[in-house]
Image (tube, grey):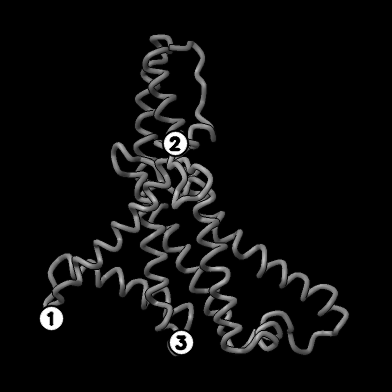
Amino acid sequence: MADVFSPPGKDDILLPSIFTWHDPFGLPFDVPVTKPQVLLVLSVVIILTFFLVTTRNLELVPSRWQFAAESVYDFGRNTIAREQIGAKEFAPYVPLIVSIFCFVLVNNLYGLIPLVQFPTFTHSGFPFAVALLVVFPLYHYVGIRKFGLKGYLRNQFVIPDVPKPVLWGLLIPTEVILKFFFDPFNLAIRVFAAMFAGHLLILVFTLGSEFMLLQAPIYLKPVSALGFALAIALFFLEALVQVLQAYIFALLSAHFIGRALAEQH
């Protein structure tokens, strides 16, 4: 073992491929399959199985599992979708908001499971894919469907009673940058940064404490106990952050939809 501690970095998050899928669906290239990709697909299976099993035989007096499923659904429906989209128009978007919340939550909570211990969204491509390919086009689509393209653009970017030089020279370019570039970036970067930083901090304290215990001089070895204690504390803190970030991701998604559907800017 080396005498100098080598701290973990971003390369420790980039896991090697488990296997290579040759010529998928007859396409002329190979696809390396990694642990995060497998976990991402598994999360969909977990969520589908959970809701299908718990809602298979609905009862007036719910079982514990039915109550758990109903609680998750009610949380997404009433706490997130209704509050952010509005009581009149929220209903069609409840399945999407609940699905986004559960999807992000399960992929975050992988970081707490022994032997897995890898929150999928520590890879930036996954949250950016959800933000750019699902949420971003959807909230613009629902706004255009309701107001028409011209009405939607006017509603989103034109502020009444503002002088035209200020409107066209400052406010409209700012709004375009915010709503077409910053919003999806902001949505994805929150969960990615939180998962990446939390996972890396736990690695630093765990591996650093192990190094102190095995390699440090005898008088410094007791410090490793403090390091392990901090790693455990960070583990529980990350659990809270994982749930919170799933909530924030779903909340912002619903907020963007509600803003697109709002009658006024």
Asked which quadrant contains residue 263, the reply is bottom right
For the residues labelled 3 and 1, say whether their Cβ atoms are less than 8 Å apart. Answer: no
What residue would you read off at disc 2?
17
Q: How many marks?
A: 3
| SS class, disc 1 | loop
Mark 3 or mark 1: name the one nearer the start of the chain. 1
Compared with residue 155, is residue 81 higher up or lower down, i.e. above or below?
above
Residue receiving disc 1: 60
Mark sitting earlier along the chain (1/2): 2
Relative to 141, is 205 on the left or the right? left
The quarter of the picture where the C terminus appears is bottom right
Q: Position of residue 181 (x, y in %)?
A: 67, 63
Q: Which residue is mark 3?
A: 89
Q: Amino acid at mark 1?
A: Leu
Spatial separation of the CA atoms under disc 3 and disc 2: 44 Å
Q: Position of residue 96 (x, y in %)?
A: 41, 72
